[in-house]
Image: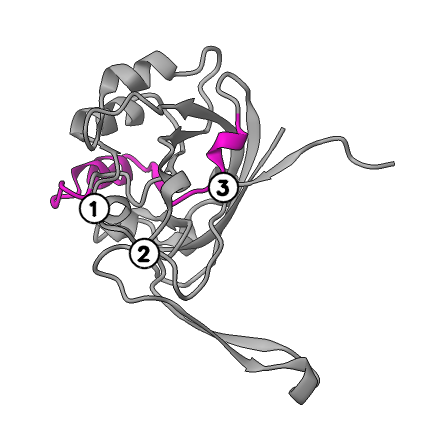
Amino acid sequence: MSDPRRVHDLTARLETHMPVWATSPLPVFEPVGVVARDGYAIERIACMTHTGTHVDAPYHFLEDGLTVDRIPPEKLVGSAAVLDLRGETQGDRIPVPALSKHWPSGPVPDMVFLHTGWSDIRAPTRKYLYEFPGIDPDGAKWLAARGIHAVGTDALGIDPYSNSKFEAHKILLGQGVYIIEAMAHLSELKEGQRYTAFVGPLKIAGASGAMARVLAVE
């Protein structure tokens, strides 16, 4: 009997010519073994750990913060809710009233995903790379005070690109809230519905973050 649960893959596909953080090199995914020639297929990867859909661990900005391999596994699985913030941004900012307006009723979820619609225009354009919406310090403090384990966004960063101090990162990570960036397909999730989310960053020793597969189950 088939399982009736629907699983949503919230992960961007990794490929060489994909948009990445403006100062990062393009990733390289190179086939080094092909079945027709070698009898097996295998690839070599060269990229930044913060490529595509990825997790920011506290160590990303905090010298004494947890590295990605030390994030407790129980914080990588939990209840999740999406905040549909399309049309709620003010320039490159997500205001606190928008977060409050769309905050789910009932028990606080372990994770919240900010759906800005930015992944719909995923491309190596100046608009996508530099104008994406993020939260300001007040928004970061507001989210951290809710008691969540993680916050995700479909934009390239939780801070807008214009905030070179990365204040939202530092506030959230300082409170033990890890960050998931460059998510995809958040339009598949419904605001007001609860999901069980699974976040699987690569377990890289001592790393500030890692590429991750993110799934949400209805």
Indicate yes or no whether the magenta region holds residue 197.
no
Q: Which mark is residue 25?
A: none
| Residue at the image point whose x is 47% and y is 49% from the top | 12
Q: Amino acid at mark 3?
A: Leu
The answer to which image quadrant residue 5 occupies is top right
Near-viewer residue (218 or 88)? 88
Q: Secondary structure at mark 1?
A: helix
Report the residue marked by disc 2: 20
| Residue at the image point whose x is 37% and y is 42% from the top | 121
| Residue at the image point whose x is 38% and y is 16% from the top | 103
Q: Is residue 181 visible?
A: no
- Vertical relation: 56 (above or below) 152: below
Q: Answer whether labels 3 and 1 touch (C-beta < 8 Å).
A: no
Report the residue marked by disc 1: 130
Mark 3 or 1, nearer chain start: 3
Q: Residue 183 appears at what percent x and percent y?
A: 42, 42
Report the residue marked by disc 3: 76
Q: Residue 56 appears at what percent x and percent y?
A: 34, 48
Q: Secondary structure at mark 2?
A: loop
Is disc 1 surrounded by few (<14), some (14 to 19) or many (20+) residues within 10 Å? some
Q: Residue furthest bottom?
A: 37
Q: CA distance from mark 1 to mark 2?
A: 11 Å
- Vertical relation: 88 (above or below) 6: above
Stretch of the chain drawn in magenta:
161-189
Number of numbered discs present?
Answer: 3
Q: Amino acid at mark 1?
A: Tyr
Mark 1 or 2, nearer chain start: 2
Q: Residue 176 appears at what percent x and percent y?
A: 32, 38
Q: Which quadrant is home to the C terminus? A: top right
Q: Residue furthest right?
A: 1
Q: CA distance from mark 3 to mark 1?
A: 29 Å
